[in-house]
Amino acid sequence: MYKVVLLGSMSVGKSSLAYRYVRNDFREFLPTVGCSFFTQTLKLEEATVKFEIWDTAGQEKYQSVCHLYYRDAHAALLVYDIASKETLKRAKLWLEDLEKKFLPDEIVIALVGNKTDLAAEREVTTEEGEEFARTKGLLFLETSAKSNYQVNDIFMAIGESSDGSR
Ligand SMILES: Nc1nc2c(ncn2[C@@H]2O[C@H](COP(=O)(O)OP(=O)(O)OP(=O)(O)O)[C@@H](O)[C@H]2O)c(=O)[nH]1
């Protein structure tokens, strides 16, 4: 079992990314209450990875609850919305939190800029996300849960950076 936690501000699309990946579908309205999780099996050439994807609500009032859940995570997706600079700022704070709780080689962290379909409203350039990820040694991809852009790729990337033995 490979535990992945989704972190990020409210409404950046955490539930939508999990839903797209697991059900290959998109819904406009997917409220998250507290924490929930999905499972999905990924077959790689060398190994099969069974994901347990934890979706934490971005709403502040749930944060104390969800705190408990990411303790033994293998990977974290730090999600922001490319149409909101503020959500990237928040993702940086989540990263600081993760850095306090994990040693660098204990967890795979991916920075995910979601909602690429909102190109006209973009506030964060691809380069900005990429550069931040590079300086922090994070995986980086931009995605759209809505138009199904690079959603599988992000899970594939974290699956491949696991050791495959879990
Ligand atoms: N245009 C666009 N909208 C998206 C995308 N992903 C999610 N949304 C929308 O953004 C809103 C929030 O999506 P959620 O998946 O509920 O976001 P969340 O991060 O799980 O939110 P919380 O559970 O409140 O923390 C919904 O209206 C979604 O339909 C995307 O890739 N493109």
Image (cartoon, rainbow, N blue to C red):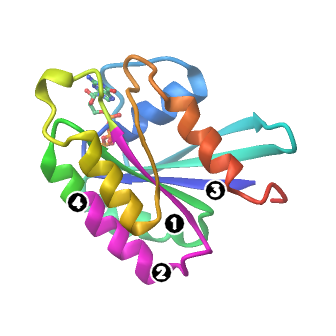
Q: SS of the residue at dot 4?
A: helix
Q: Are marks 3 and 2 in contact (CB under 8 Å)?
A: no
Q: Amino acid at mark 3?
A: Lys
- Point out residue 115 in the picture as x, y percentages from the top left corner: 29, 29
What range of the chain is rendered magenta? 90-113
Q: Residue at x 67, y 55 (%)?
A: 161
In three-dimensional space, the C-alpha distance between marks 3 and 4, rounded to whole angstroms, equals 22 Å
Q: Which mark is residue 101?
A: 2
Q: Amino acid at mark 4?
A: Arg
Which residue is nearer to you in this view: 34 or 150? 150
Which is more N-terminal, label 1 or label 2?
A: 1
Q: Amino acid at mark 1?
A: Tyr
- Point out residue 15 in the picture as x, y percentages from the top left corner: 41, 37
Residue picked out by circle 4: 90
Query: Is residue 113 positioned above or below 144 on the image?
Result: below
Q: SS of the residue at dot 2?
A: helix
Q: Amino acid at mark 2?
A: Lys
Q: Quadrant of residue 149?
A: top left
- In the rendered structure, the answer to whether residue 108 lies left or right of residue 163 reads left
- Point out residue 91 in the picture as x, y percentages from the top left corner: 29, 58
Q: Which mark is residue 3?
A: 3
Between circles 2 and 1, the one closer to the viewer is 2
Q: Residue at x 59, y 29 (%)?
A: 22
Q: Which mark is residue 105?
A: none
Residue picked out by circle 1: 70
Which is more N-terminal, label 2 or label 3?
A: 3
Q: Check disc 1: other Cα within 10 Å, few if <14, some if 14-19, many if 20+.
A: some
